Amino acid sequence: MNILFLHPNFPGQFLQLSRYLGATGRHKVMFLSKDQNGSKLPGVQVGVYPKPREATKGIHHYLKLCEEAVMEGQAVIKGIHALKQQINFTPDVVVGHTGWGSTLFVKDILPKVPLIGYFEWYYNAYGGDTCYWPDETQSIDDMCRIRTINTHHLLNLQACDVRYTPTQWQKAQFPKMYQEGMKVIHEGVETDYIKPQPGRKFILPEQKLDLSDCEELVTYVSRGFEQYRGFPQFMDTIRLLLQRRPNCHVVICGMDRACYGPQYAKDKTWKQMEEEKGGYDKSRVHFVGHLKREEYLMLLQASTVHVYLTRPFILSWSCLEAMGAGCCLVGSATPPVQEVVEDGVNGLLANFRRPEHIVMRIEEALDDPDLRARLGKAARETVLEKYELKDCMRAQLNMIYGAMK
């Protein structure tokens, strides 16, 4: 079978699935992307299409993302045509991330080929990431813009033969008429690798950081330091926490950028703003940047309490991986986290907007080793039961083979 994956940033959410299919040797697996990132997967060939130009200068701001999606879709179909011309590759099935427009025109050039769309998020003016709490408001301009940026999502919902999304919360964001038939299949957690290792210590020789003697290690992981992942709230939390816990250290993993939502200001990042604000012991707060996979696992395994905060938005892999590693998790009491974490059963939930409450839940865990052990054990059991990679992979493969019938 010829299988084509589409994602602008190789391999994205299709890492495990494309790697598995490529490794079987039974399929020809191609991946079209505009950025290979230097990564390679055995049995997976990668074609890179040119990055589309920027949106037209001065275009109505409601239409900027729409134009970008159209250009992304155009670039992809040119890439598909090139695969046919250069290596005589025509897919039997296409699996693509719909978020950037990659899948937009696939059915127009491959009308008889099953198209499976990975749907990550649908924007709503109220009840989701942009305006969730009763005291939050939206301008008319924002509401109109949010409606318009769903244009390519609606086109993809109509075009795809099979639609799937990782969580029930993410499914609930889509129009009800499209929720029926939309599958919920997570990418899965590699629990044979992501697992607890009691007694592990956090040491980064290259950064000359040795926390092997640390009695209390609070950890935080996010691709970017931003509002959506509660970075400002976390920094306010540790200001309070470090005053109360003289032996506590904090490790913050991620990059100084905003992946979702706005930057703090045009010339200032959220991290720069927090550093200017100060008010915490910088000798006990360690920004370690982007970690290698094994270093990241070491951080989770060494963590005393892991904090995961998010607005009502996409659930991060890091939340489930922390649970899979047996972390004692303090998470925000927001819908994506509440789908996975039951307060007092497999984690502790805190008010996203109240740093003093987050501190209270962290200290509750720090003061009770038995509680931490019980919650960490239950967290891993949750992942094994609902998000084990082998089970998620089986569901994804059944979806692909089912689309071929």
Image (cartoon, rainbow, N blue to C red):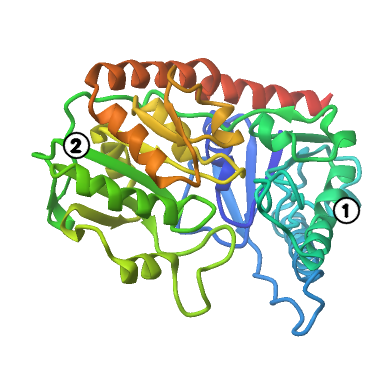
Q: Is residue 346 above or below residue 299?
A: above
Q: Work out whether residue 331 can be spotted.
A: yes
The picture places residue 353, in percent across and down from the top left corner, at 50, 47
The image quarter containing residue 328 is: top left
Q: Which circle's residue, 1 or 2, is located before the other in the chain? A: 1
Percent across and percent down for residue 40 are 47, 49
The furthest residue to the bottom: 58
Name the residue located 13 percent from the left edge and 35 percent from the top edge.
Answer: 215
Q: Pointer 2: what residue?
A: 216
186 versus 271 height, above or below: above
Asked if residue 241 is positioned above or below residue 267 in the image, the reply reads above
Instruction: Give yes or no for contact between labels 1 and 2 (Cβ–Cβ under 8 Å).
Output: no
- Image position of 316 with respect to 278: above or below: above
Q: Secondary structure at mark 2?
A: strand
**Disc 1 residue type (three-letter):** Ile
Check the picture and name the quadrant holding the N terminus: top right
Which residue corresponds to mark 1?
Answer: 109
Residue 189: x and y in percent read: 48, 29
Specify the label residue 169 is tagged with: none
Q: Amino acid at mark 2?
A: Glu
